[in-house]
């Protein structure tokens, strides 16, 4: 070991000797005190501390502490890596529609013969297809909610051992009103899970189906969601498109479907336009539940019906404020076609000073007419209508009487 003499300034080396043995300076003879083993005493202290921690806490506890620090950093690294993955833009043959997908997904032709776009990565079992159905081939009474329900039910029925689909999730895909469903099932003896996103444009209902193996769904869901969210279409309504009947253009003509798909409510205008009355019919299958001889809403409103068909809730996107903002009727709740109660702006919006205006109408809901937020939707259980007012208050109206 090396020892420094404070008297003569000489640094001298000694062989390793037991702790406590006294050494003398060879030059001046000063007693230098007890010698220490070779090595840095501070490094030994650090070693003692580590050993002490292991003895007190135990190896599993120390490994747990290390994991708590390392795992979040590893997850962040993975997220950054995924964000930097190269992507590609795939278009249909006419160049009107496009999807943005990972570069590792290659265009395919064997997934669906009617697909406008189809791609996938067999090695990781990730797939996507884009389908479209022209609105001029459908009744004008079929809106986004009704079409989405019909589409997901038909798709789930084509699989075996399927528990069905999750509740509809309202979205806006690049400014297009949309609804998304989660599905699980077995296809060709393989368990799969994925998302169906139904997107409404003036001329077409599009469906983006993205899926993977059930065991990979939780991990790959962000990719599947991103593929659907990337949808874009140059799809204006054809100027020459004509309805089969002028009645079909009326705002009073509409049809909605309950969350479980078993009940429908249809409103049909009667008489000359501008002076019409309406007939509303609720059915379970082919059996009528109730009828009403009045107009209960228009296609501009949000309309919801309970699974038992008894209660109808109408939220008005743009309620008219003829008698002041706070007195405006923003929603109506009907029981078997008869008005149960009206909801006024003063009762729905707690901070009514945040109400906005569009002409003589009010903007009172999030997710509507350019107001950021989530649009009204059925609850996960399908037993209520959930919505958020413009002041950020989350509310619900029960669908059971």
Image (cartoon, rainbow, N blue to C red):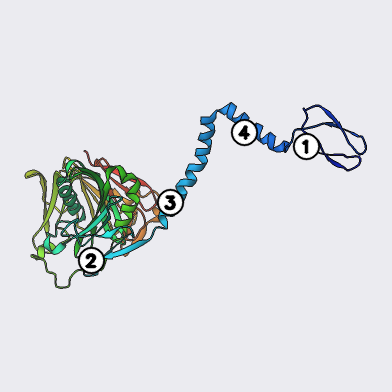
Q: With respect to residue 258, does 133 lie above or below?
A: below
Q: Secondary structure under badge 4?
A: helix
Q: Secondary structure under badge 1?
A: loop
Pointer 1 with pointer 4, Cβ within 8 A: no
For the residues labelled 1 and 2, the Cα–Cα distance comes to 79 Å
Q: With respect to residue 169, does 300 lie above or below?
A: below
Q: Earlier in the sequence, mark 1 or mark 4?
A: 1
Q: With respect to residue 137, does 218 lie above or below?
A: above
For the residues labelled 2 and 4, the Cα–Cα distance comes to 63 Å
Evaluate whether residue 66 shows in this view: yes
Identify the residue under disc 3: 79
Q: Secondary structure under badge 3?
A: helix
Pointer 3 with pointer 2, Cβ within 8 A: no
Residue lying at the far front in this picture: please name it.
15
Q: Earlier in the sequence, mark 1 or mark 3?
A: 1
Q: Is residue 184 left or right of residue 391?
A: left
Q: Residues within 10 Å of mark 1 (few under 14, many from 20)?
A: few
Residue 276 position, x and y percent, is 12, 60
Identify the residue under disc 4: 50
- Please give the label number shown on residue 92: 2
Pointer 2 with pointer 4, Cβ within 8 A: no
Residue 119 position, x and y percent, is 26, 58
Judging depth in this view, the residue of 150 and 218 nearest the camera is 218
């Amino acid at each position: 070991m090396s020892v420094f003499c404070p008297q003569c300034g000489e640094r001298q080396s000694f062989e390793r000797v037991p702790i406590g043995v006294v050494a003398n300076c060879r030059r001046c003879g000063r007693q230098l005190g007890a010698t220490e083993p070779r090595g840095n005493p501070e490094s030994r202290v650090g070693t003692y501390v580590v050993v002490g921690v292991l003895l007190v806490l135990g190896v599993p506890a120390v490994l747990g502490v290390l994991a708590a620090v390392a795992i979040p950093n590893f997850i962040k690294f993975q997220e950054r890596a995924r964000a930097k993955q190269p992507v590609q833009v795939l278009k249909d043959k006419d160049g009107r529609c496009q999807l943005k997908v990972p570069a590792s997904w290659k265009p395919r032709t064997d997934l669906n013969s009617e697909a406008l776009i189809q791609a996938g990565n067999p090695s990781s079992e990730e797939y996507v297809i884009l389908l479209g159905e022209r609105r001029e081939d459908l009744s004008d009474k079929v809106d986004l909610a009704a079409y989405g329900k019909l589409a997901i039910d038909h798709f789930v029925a084509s699989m075996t051992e399927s528990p069905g689909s999750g509740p509809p999730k309202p979205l806006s895909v690049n400014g297009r009103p949309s609804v998304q469903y989660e599905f699980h099932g077995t296809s060709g003896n393989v368990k799969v899970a994925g998302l169906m996103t139904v997107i409404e444009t003036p001329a077409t209902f599009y469906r983006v189906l993205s899926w993977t193996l059930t065991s990979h769904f939780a991990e790959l869901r962000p990719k599947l969601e991103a593929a659907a969210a990337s949808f874009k279409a140059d799809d204006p309504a054809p100027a020459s498109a004509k309805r089969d009947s002028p009645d079909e253009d009326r705002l009073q003509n509409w049809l909605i479907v309950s969350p479980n798909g078993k009940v429908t409510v249809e409103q049909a205008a009667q008489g000359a336009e501008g002076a019409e009355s309406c007939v509303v019919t609720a059915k379970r299958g082919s059996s009528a539940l109730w009828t009403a001889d009045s107009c209960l809403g228009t296609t501009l409103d949000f309309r919801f019906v309970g699974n038992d068909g008894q209660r109808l809730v109408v939220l008005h996107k743009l309620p008219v404020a003829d008698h002041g903002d706070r007195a405006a009727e923003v929603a109506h709740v009907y029981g078997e076609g008869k008005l149960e109660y009206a909801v006024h702006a003063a009762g729905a919006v707690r901070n009514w000073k945040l109400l906005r205006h569009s002409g003589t109408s009010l903007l009172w809901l999030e997710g509507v007419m350019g107001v950021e937020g989530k649009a009204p939707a059925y609850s996960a259980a399908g037993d209520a209508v959930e919505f958020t007012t413009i002041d950020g208050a989350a509310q619900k109206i029960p669908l059971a009487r």
